[in-house]
Amino acid sequence: MKLKVISRSGRTVLPEGIVLPSDAKVSDLKKIFHEMKRAYYPTRQRFTTVATKDAPRGVALEDAKALRDYGLVDGDTIVFKDLGPQVSYKAVFFFEYLGPLLAYLPFYFARETIYGKMLGFKDAGKAPLEAQTLAMYFHTAHYVKRILETFFVHSFSHATMPIFNLMRNCSYYWTFGAVMSYFINHPAYTPVGRTQMLAGFAFSAVMQLSNLRCHIILANLRKDGSKAYVIPSGFLFNYVTCANYCTEIYQWLGFNIATQSAMGYTFMCCGAAQMLQWAIAKHKRLRKLFPGTDGKPKFRRPFILLPPFF
């Protein structure tokens, strides 16, 4: 079978077309396309069918499916999009989590140098407060957990993402990590009462462990390698659609109750705003996929993201 390949603007990408076996899969298409266009390795490619009234953006071609599953026959046209330079998900997660971990520590361990010699603040050489020490341990433990989960727990539905995401995500995490540490470890920092501090850190610890449990549940959903949607269940997923996001937000809430940092609350709110969008989209998708008809289970949960509020 011979297919015509055009860009999204309608420009012909391969004047000679691309010849494929009649039973070729989309993954085969990408391999052969890469042989013809060496700059576009498979994870950089995205193919769709031509736009129609029912599918204004075309239908995205999935690697595991055969071209004939999309009704493609000899002489048909497919649309190519260059996704740009790619980087693995694991690399993105590793660097975006390593950054805040390392950015936080100098403000704690090099207090006298940074606040005293470099910035000229008084009392820069005094010993850190108990709240500052516990905050350092909790912040470090959080990102060490994140890095370990990246390599040993998480499973990714896609192997790569655009390299721009690496720069954007690193800028977000690294900047907040450094700025939060600057204020929490500042010589003029005033801690909250000890009871509030310990209660906040205790709540944060419980939420961190709960978050780990949620991630393990999600990692076990598709152990068979299937990409089909599965309703997450067990533990907090019986009550909250996105229990993993919920515990992530609440663990930062506990951290901020203990440290009372304006930048910490800002970081939490920025993350929560993004996770809220993801949670609503996932809730809608699960309700659509599992309507309770045609033998499918009905998806329902009391809360989408933040019990008892949302």
Image (cartoon, rainbow, N blue to C red):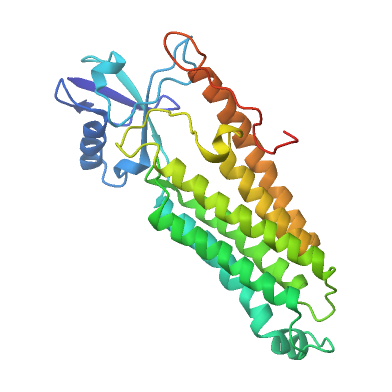
Q: Is residue 37 above or below residue 283?
A: below
Q: Is residue 87 above or below residue 145?
A: above
Q: x and y percent of residue 13 in the render? A: 32, 31
Q: Nearer the viewer, residue 256 or 276?
A: 256
Q: x and y percent of residue 213 in the render? A: 50, 49
Q: Is residue 248 above or below residue 297?
A: below
Residue drawn at (43%, 8%), measured in percent from left and top? 294
Instruction: State which quadrant residue 27 falls in.
Output: top left
Report how many numbered discs are placed on residues in the image: 0
Q: Seen in the image, is 1 located left or right of residue 279?
A: left
Instruction: State which quadrant residue 59 falls in.
Output: top left
Residue drawn at (81%, 63%), measured in percent from left and top? 196
Q: Seen in the image, is 113 located left or right of residue 187?
A: left
Q: Seen in the image, is 35 located left or right of residue 137?
A: left
Q: x and y percent of residue 9 in the render? A: 45, 27
Residue drawn at (66%, 54%), measured in percent from left and top? 251
Q: Nearer the viewer, residue 48 or 155?
A: 155
Residue drawn at (78%, 77%), measured in percent from left and top? 186
Q: Quadrant of the C terminus?
A: top right
Q: Nearer the viewer, residue 129 or 12?
A: 129
Instruction: State which quadrant residue 122 falls in.
Output: bottom right
Q: Quadrant of the N terminus?
A: top left
The reply to whether residue 249 is in sight is: yes
